[in-house]
Image (cartoon, rainbow, N blue to C red):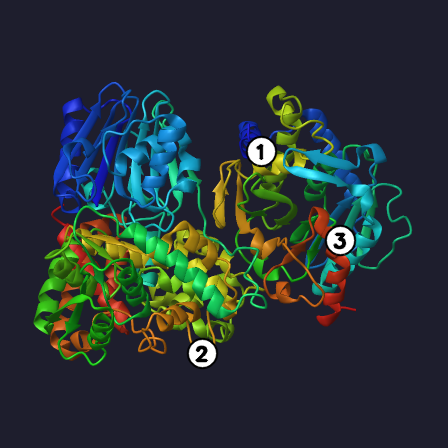
Amino acid sequence: MSVERQVNKAIEIAKSKRGTILAEAISEQCKEKANFFSAHKKFTSDINIVFFHINIPAKDSVVETIDIKSIDHHAFEYEAMIALNIKVALWSNPRARVFLITDKQFMENFEHERVTVIRSHVVPSEPMYERVMAYNAYVQSTLFDAPTVFLDSDAFLINSPDSLFMLDFDVGVTHRDVIGQMPINEGVIFANNYRKDCVINFFNAYLSIYSALEDDRELGTIYQRIRRWRGGQLSINGASGGFTKYATGIQSDELGFQKALLPCSMFNLSLESFGPGRVDMFNRSMVLHFKGPRKTWISAFEESLYVQGFN
Amino acid sequence: MCGISGVVNKLGLLEPQHCEAVIDRMNEHLKHRGPDRLGTWHSPEDKVSLGHTRLSIMDLSDVASQPMQDVTGQYVLSYNGELYNYSSIREYLEKNHGVVFKTTGDTEVFLYGLIHIGVEKFLSMADGMFAAAYLDTAAKKLILIRDRAGEKPLYFFDDPSIFAFSSELKPLIEIKDSPSIDSASLYFYLLLRYVPAPYSLIKGIYKLEAGQYLSFCLESHQKEVISYFSWDPDPDLLDTSRLSAEKAADVVEALLSESIQSVMSSDVPIGFFLSGGIDSSICAALARKKTQDNINSYTIQFENDPNSEHEISETTAKLLGLRHKKRLISVSEIKERSEVMIQAMDEPNGDRSCVPTFLLSEFAKSDVTVAIGGDGGDELFGGYSRYNGINSALASSSLSGPYNTLLTYYSRLLPVFGAGEASRLVNGIPAKSLEHLHSRAAHLVMPCDLRQAIRFLDFKEYLPGAVLSKVDRTSMLNSLEVRTPFFSRDLLTIAAKLPTDLLYKDGQTKVLLRHIAHKNGLTHLSSLKKQGFGMPLSFILGDEAHVRERFKNSVESIMGSRLIKAMDDRTAVNFANVKANNINSIWATIVLGEWLEGISNV
């Protein structure tokens, strides 16, 4: 079976698990985590930016699946990358604050007046599942009191999302049309906070699909150990509707939320090439995403930031 | 071109003979779309009936008639359109699936493509304009399909007892229980001059959006609408430091030339619409390179119109050696024919170029069955004059945010009634309208360059809603098929990759198409400004008494319309003080009133 057909099959399976009811144990875990997160509330801002990152054991750091060529996460300096990412996000959004949800050790000495570091207990070998769980807890916590952008460690918020959040939607996800890749990318998610229950519906769907997929034998022939990699990506595709292609716009979802389907080219741009001095993306996209091997371009990107007045 | 229709008798409440009669009536309504043959297909077991009216273009034999079944009888297709790359798909199906074709046309290729390649995959391969209904009797699925740009229309409604669809709105109004005007759609009409998909002017009747298909389960009666194509900015723009405008123009010209070759394929005579604009002229110029045969081209000239482009089109025709025909239209003829056209129009469209397009189609039909036009060139290659200064025009809006930017665009740069008056007339912006506008405004979120972003918005809204519906309906009223080469998959792909400097330069629009025009000897066009194809102002402004009379009668028709009153009484009353203070709002009122008058007998 071709990669495209396998990916489409996996999405179809994810779609078949759509729902917003979490298993009792998972629901309890999320609530507990949400209470723990709420205890970190110190101040409010106009925009919240959420990063999740944990240290992964060396034996689990290599991703190699049908739709991703081999990547070893240990090859990248995540502490420096996230430190830069936070700095960029706060520079492009002067009225924002950042939440870094992580484990006990990552960026141990990091401190910033506009950054709240939340260190919680996690299973290090299950980073993607832990992230979806953390996102769910965040939207249920009192921290979710402003429009929020959830970002991958390598997804840089280079422009303000203020104008996006003026639109009437609950959750915004980014879509692309690349053969053999899932259409919705998990690396950038926007959540508006004025209908919190609707946002929770989405994040419950995201997590409940994830949990349901674990036991699916057919999916097990396509992706293995999904709590580690790919399960989150697959679940967000299911939670977003479970289609193989999307059209830009805002739609009502039967699960009880308004979803904004946003083109990756404008909201989650992954360039095919990058060189020093390249600045055109600052006028084109809200987020610049250095997926996979593109991370090696981050230093060139940093140089281009200075041209834009970054310091 | 053709008309398609169908009914699913969901609860089995209708007698089979009644379903057959419904399809016959819908076929009668759609006869102008396909006068050559009326076809029906009924399955009492599945409670499905399909209809088809055929305008024979390719494979004129009876074997190619529709609705068409496959050899097993499991699959049935009712199809309206042209699959331009049918030859290559046919070869693929013969080679890989052993299909033995009985016809030489594209319908059978469309049918077997869906069967063997699968719906989504087949649609991703298909190059063409089409709307289709595809039934899988074993899987109990009815699938409705619409092409990428929305060239061919498809309406449907889903009532408790009936699911029905049709190429046009009017046949569905006739069979729908208690039809009324939809307030959100009326708001859109007043704001935009057309009703954008997925809505229609009638409550509960929807248009399938361009690039979508709808899957309806005959057993559960559940339906799902799925997008298979969305024209969005490509992440990888062409790099102008490596590719000059001249080179980029060469690439576009090669793709356009290939597409023109495809759209020229026909078993009946074809001709070209030739205005004074760049798009239609380039199409004719590239066609000229393909053949030494005579090429017919058509244009119209309005009497006493100082903006008429006929002289430019005559120069173009002379340069290209076309057999060019011009028809002079008098003011009195416009008055008379516009009334006829509006009453016959399927769904009201207040675009002033409907009348000239109708008259041009009527003229071309006297010689040919297929005409090639240049629609789509403006959206793909940045042609509208309003695009060029759009950043500053919209930046001056006092209200911020993409929703306000969108309303300002519609109210200032494409003005009809404006958001305020449109809202007053329907007693406040309906929630559905608000949702739809927010959805479309997702294209205009900053930091985008509006000159870029607006193309993608117009491709999804203005192009199918105003332009392509105008072309389809006015040409179909004359049983003429109009094709455009601009929507091939390859052209859509490259147009989505164009950076701003390949669209606009030194105050000019359509940089690449101007290069192509120049290179092909059409030097007289390369610096021309876009004129548009609207009715001459002399008609509307030159005979005030006539306009006032029609406007007054239209307002009375709107106020007295049972369809409007079925929506609510207050809207009808609001029209007593309608503030139509520009040419577009006056014309939109006339079109709406006369259309409602015409539909009162349906």
Can you give x and y, in whole percent of width and height, for residue A253 in the image? 50, 40
The CA span between labels 1 and 3 is: 26 Å
Q: Label 1 sits on what residue type?
A: Val
Circle 2 residue? B507
Please identify the quarter of the rendering in which residue A180 is found: top right
Graded by Cα atoms within 10 Å as few (under 14), some (14 to 19) or many (20 or more), the crowding at tag 3 reads: some
The CA span between labels 3 and 2 is: 39 Å
Q: Label 2 sits on what residue type?
A: Gly
Please tell me which residue lies in front, A271 or A266.
Answer: A271
> Which labelled disc corresponds to residue A296?
3
The CA span between labels 2 and 1 is: 47 Å
Lateral position of residue B528 relative to residue A297, left or right: left
Secondary structure under badge 2? loop
Residue found 22% across the figure and 31% down from its top: B67
Secondary structure under badge 3? helix
Mark 3 or 2: the one toward you = 3
User: Residue farthest to the right?
Assistant: A109
**Could one spot residue B428 in this view of the protein?**
no
Residue A24 against residue B79 in the figure, above or below:
above
Residue found 41% across the figure and 71% down from its top: B515
Circle 1 residue? A3
| Tags 2 and 1 both on a single chain | no
Residue found 58% across the figure and 38% down from its top: A237
Can you give x and y, in whole percent of width and height, for residue B18 in the image? 15, 27
